[in-house]
Structures are given as structure tokens and as C-alpha cells.
Image (tube, helix red, strand yellow):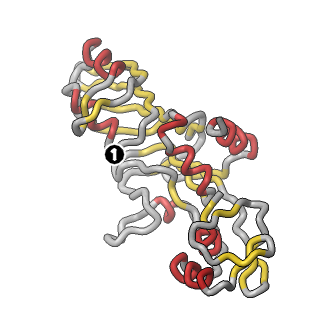
Amino acid sequence: MERLQKVMAHAGVASRRESENIISKGRVKVNGIVITEMGCKVGPDDHITVDGEPIEREEKVYILLNKDRQVISTVDDPQNRDTVIDSVEGIKERIYPVGRLDYDTTGALLLTNDGELANKLMHPRYEFEKTYVAKVNGRVTEEALQQLKTGVIIEGKETAPARVKLLSYDKKTDHSIVKLVIHEGRNHQVKLMMQAVGHPVKELTREKYGFLETTGLSLGQWRHLKDKEVAKLRKTVSS
């Protein structure tokens, strides 16, 4: 379910603020009933009219992007930096990223206009997993791995237990490669976790978003999700 004014804005009726103004004037009906309250939520099967004319609702779009470095995870940017929306050409629907990846982090990022699904995927209740691979300074010890597995304090709050594995260590460069699976979505979380155990991140990529992988996608490339993948996402957050 999404707020009526948001659905109207996505359908191109007007901006969200102007859509609220239209609603307040009694010009909008949902299933034949005049709506004037801002809190009204509608589903995909609800019939919406403005001044007696049905609105054309956007088709739901689900895209997996292999985000490149130096691309910001927003719809637009006041500093005119490249955004993830710039990476996805030819999509007329108003999509937006589900969560975010740091400016210098690469990897799997979901973009959609399905607000209900996006909100559930980001809600802590569903513990939706994200898999990261980090190149860090130093040789990561078993003690550091155990700390990450049980939880570390970042910004005054303990992280949930993570699944962590040391993949390799390069003695020449003194860099370790570590895989982490987390379900929280705190800002800069993996970087702060590795910093907390004394191993600052040099490079970071999100290898998987849930079960979605970037296999076959070069940096900056994207693809539409398959119907069965969308169904699986919905099932994951349906309980």
C-alpha cells in the first residue's frame, strides 16, 4: 500500500505537494469515494480518478545495477555528480534505489518504483541479507573475525552478529580480503565495522543483495529482474 499522493505523483498527475492540494479540494476518488484526507493509502487494484478521469498508474519496475565507483546512490545530486539513475538509461518510470551504497563502493543495488516492497526490504524486521567483499589493511586475525561475528560497537551501538570469512591475505601488499554477510543497513556499516577491529577498508563491493548477484554484469551495467526473482523477493518479506 502507498500513499495516494505518491501514487498520483508517480502517475504524472502532478508533484506530490500539488497532488495533496488536488486531494484536499475533493477532486480525487478512490473506488468511487471522494478522498480529502492525506493519510489515504491505496493498493494496485484500487481505481483512482481525478476530476472523473482515471489515472494511468506506472508499471512496477525492478532493476539490478552493478554500481560503479564514484556514483552516488540518489535520484539527483546538487553537486552534479553521477547518480545511479544516470546509470540506468531508457527507463521512463520514476525509480529510486533501495538503500544505498557509498560513493566509492561498487556492487549490487536494487532500483524500483515499488515503494511497498522497498520499505519491507529495508525494514530491520525482515533481516534481509547483504554480502560484501572488502579489501582491508593488515592481516585479519581470528580474534578480529570473532569480534565481527559477535558484534562490535560503532557510533555507540553494537552491530548484529555477522557471518565473516577471511578469503585471503597478501603478504607483499599487507592486504586481506574478507567476506561479510550482514542484515543491517547502517551508514558506512562495513567500513566502520572493519575500522573497529583495526583493519581499515581499502576497497569494498557488495557481491550480493539477498540472493541477487551481479554475475554477468560489468560495473555500471544493469538488468531487469525476472518475474521469479520479484516473486522470491516478495516471499522473503511476506511473513
| Kind of residue sitting beneath label 1 | Asn
Q: Does any portion of residue 92 appear in the rendered image? A: no
In the figure, is residue 55 to the left or right of 205?
right
Query: How many numbered dots are placed on residues in this image?
Result: 1
Picture layout, residue 111 above or below residue 189: below
Residue 87 visible: yes
Q: Is residue 53 shown above or below 63?
A: below
Question: Closest to the observer: 208 or 238?
Answer: 238
Left or right of residue 60: residue 142: left
Mark 1 crowdedness (10 Å alpha carbons): few <14, some 14-19, many ≥20: few
User: What residue sits right under mark 1 in the picture?
Assistant: 187
160, 50: nearer the viewer: 50
The quarter of the picture where residue 140 lies is: top left
Q: Is residue 68 left or right of residue 13?
A: left
Q: Position of residue 132 (x, y in %)?
A: 43, 33
User: Which quarter of the figure has residue 112?
Assistant: bottom right
Between residue 202 and residue 30, name the one nearer to us: 30
**Which quadrant of the rendered structure holds the C terminus?**
top right
Residue located at (39% from left, 21% from top): 164
Q: Is residue 96 above or below residue 106?
A: below
Q: What x and y, as percent, mark residue 142? A: 29, 12
**Residue that appears at 60% across and 65% down:** 3
Q: Position of residue 185 (x, y in %)?
A: 41, 41
**Helix, strand or loop at mark 1:** loop
The residue depicted at 72 percent of the width and 78 percent of the height is 34
Residue 208 vertical position relative to residue 152 in the rendered view, above or below? below
